[in-house]
Image: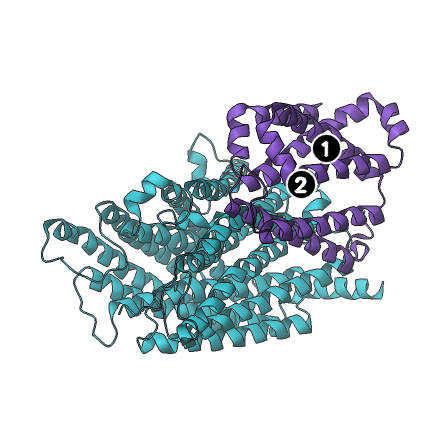
Chain colours: A purple, B cyan
Amino acid sequence: MNQFLFGFLLLVFLALPPVANLLESIMIVHMHMQMPLLVIAGFLMAYYFQKKYPAFFEKWNQRGYPGILLFSIIMIYWMLPRAMDDALTSQTVEIFKYISLPFLAGVPLRDSWAKLTSFLKNIVIISFTIMFIMMGLLYIAWPEQLCNNYLMIEQITLGWGFITMAACMVIYLVYNVLIDPMQYEGLAE
Amino acid sequence: METARNISFTEKANKVLGISPKDAIISKSYLLVAFAALLIGGVLGLLQGLNRAGLFNLPTWFNYYQVLTAHGLLLVLVLTAFFTIGYFYAVLSHNLGGLLPKVRKMAWIGFGMKIFGFVLAVIPILLNQATVMYTFYPPMAASPIFYIGLVFIVLGVWMCAFGCFTQVANWRKNNKGQHVPILSYFATGVFVLLFFGSIPVAIEVFMIIPWALGWVETINVLVARTLFWAFGHTLVNIWYLTAVSAWYVVVPKLIGGRRFSDMLTRVVIIMLVVLNIPGGFHHQIIDPGIAESVKFLHVFMSLAIGFPSLMTAYAMFSVFEKTARKKGGKGVFSWFNKLPWGDVRFLAPMIAMIAFIPGGAGGIVQSTNQLNQVVHNTMWVVGHFHLTVGTTVVLTFFGISYWLVPFLSKRVLTPAINKLGVIQTIIWTTGMIFMAGAMHWVGLLGSPRRTSYTTYFDNATALSWDPYLFFLAIGGTLLMVGIILQVYAVVYLMFFAPKGETEFPIAEVENHATKTPYWTEKWGRIIVIMLLLIAMAYVIPLVEMIINAPPGSPPFQTW
């Protein structure tokens, strides 16, 4: 219940107009801080839904595939430059952002992640890494403004943000490949 | 199974017989270099202080700024790095059943690289070709040899970091599922920070070398400064984390108590590691070309480090009070009497901790935009780091030396040397109160740092600084006496004290302590989180600095 409360409070906090205005005023903060925080809010609230409606998740997300697919679709949609512009200009899309990221990305992510095998988890991380590298290159190299609302320099910054996040994920993947946890944690765990 | 038995045998042997001579000589060599640097750096500091007070004129062939560069380099780089590595290699050897032969080799290669690099860096300083202050960022340019020397120092540090990782990984393989002993956990944290923190400075130095050689004409000053402080700020906290390791683990043992929660200790280490590098801009608050919002973000991260520090303060005083009350201490404050004030191994780190109260507060002042503008580049800043590094960190190092050196040399701390240590600590504290106190005050009155003695054509304001500068010189003289006593104690304990067994003091956790969760051992995840935070802190300003870069600066030789 605590987790639900924290998640809900985070969502309310992020929805406060001054907070939303501040976070949306910088492109990279909009995409790489506000949006992930919305997902985290949903991730925290998911626990309550899982407890309250176990049958629903059991029926519709038995092995975690639909959930992770939904999560991926929502995430990819919000990576589009156009989507950010829409959110800034149309109130309806902005509301959709505040609903889709927590409830259609955060909640299914939590429910699915526990159910996925480590192979599939790695596939998801690898796909997002490739996507981040591509998006990073796009934002860095494109000669024109991709978003009406943000300047070129912000676009390039966002591109480098994608690349550094992808680099972190690559480091994590390499660490996962090179280090066998059984060698270190075997007996007591 | 075979290996497991072997390891536990060597661990037992280590405990019974003390540190192996091969491991001991590594730590002893590192400590000897550290204290030699203290002695030379101290003499240079005294010269600087006397010059600054107008009492002593430095010759033209060895001027104030050369002395300043050498003093800084010897004390903030050599003393601290060599002590930290010597201390933690002794920890790894003691904790983890002796160093592996390859780790020993890595420590020696690292030692050689650092000494070689240091010699390369010192030659141009002596020749007055590298008088760039120890913060060595552009547009002042030193001789390329100076920077090549720095590269070797960084490589030497990396060698030691990888030595530590190899040793810890090996231990974990042989002790599956167990927590790395707490002091070795500190060592891991410190070496993770040393490695990742020195990457930005390595990039900076590689930017500078072609520029100093004249291969490229200009350099992006702001990027270089940013990379420098990403490292500089981290280095400060590496010293601090080293000192904290002794506070959490060693001091409770010395006063006859138990250490505070193991989990809290590990969380403090993780927080210091994760939150550290993204806070470098509080050193650049007055720099133009950085958006205020980005500075604010960095200040937030800098102040976030205050949180684990407050946890530490709480933990330490809780241990003190609990232990003192067990020994019959009563009242609100009178239980303090039950602490072993006459034992230098306790007294020195205790004063170090107390010094961190004003030291930390001064740091918060400097991280605050408006207050920083009052004290920026004044003597206040010099006073601040003489209080934090020169007292909090160094007094803890001194306190450690009174048990670590005899432990390594298989000798004992005699009552006479203990008494000498107590006197030394008192002299050091008094000297620092005078010197750092005067520096803080005169800084508030506007006296600039890094300026040779001048009265600015007998300007009245500048003349009003003089009395404070005398106090600075008096403090500096007392500190010199302290250094001589300290170096004497170390040499005596290393080579001349009576033979005997000295224990490596490691406090146990409380009996009812809660179990530490295993996620604290997953360094891979911790490092990825750290890298993400670093990206958050540096992507925005660096892209801005590089894309919207000014034309760049040619090298300047201002001296």
Residue under the point 79% across and 39% down: A113
> What is the x, y in percent for residue A186?
82, 53
- The front one of A173 and B549 is B549
Q: In this view of the protein, can residue B251 be seen by the observer?
A: no
Disc 1 designates what residue?
A106
Tell me the element at label 1: helix
* The quarter of the displayed image where residue B102 is located: bottom right
Which amino acid type is shown beneath numbered disc 1?
Gly
Q: Tell me if residue B144 can be seen.
A: yes
Subunit ID for the residue under disc 1 = A
Looking at the picture, does residue B430 appear above or below residue B115?
A: above
Tell me the residue that label 2 is attached to.
A79
- Name the one closer to the observer, B355 or A164: A164
Under mark 2, the amino acid is Met
x, y (%) of residue A10? 61, 27
Q: Callout 2: few (<14), some (14-19), or many (20+) C-alpha neighbours within 10 Å?
A: some
Question: Can you say whether A60 is above or below B107 in the image?
Answer: above
Q: Dividing the image into 4 quarters, which one contains the N terminus of chain B?
A: bottom right
Same subunit under labels 2 and 1?
yes
Quadrant where the C terminus of chain B is found in the figure: bottom left
Element carrying mark 2: helix
Nearer the camera: disc 2 or disc 1:
2
| Disc on the earlier residue, 2 or 1 | 2
**Residue B424 on image: x %, y %:** 36, 58
Say the numbered circle drawn on residue B198. Answer: none
- Distance (Cα) linking label 2 and label 1: 16 Å
Mark 1, Cα crowd under 10 Å, few <14 / some 14-19 / many 20+, is many
Residue at the spot 41% in from the left edge and 41% down from the top edge: B292
Residue B145 is situated, as x and y percent measured from the top left of the image, at 42, 77
Task: Spot the residue most to the top.
Answer: A52
Question: In the image, is B397 to the left or to the right of A75?
Answer: left
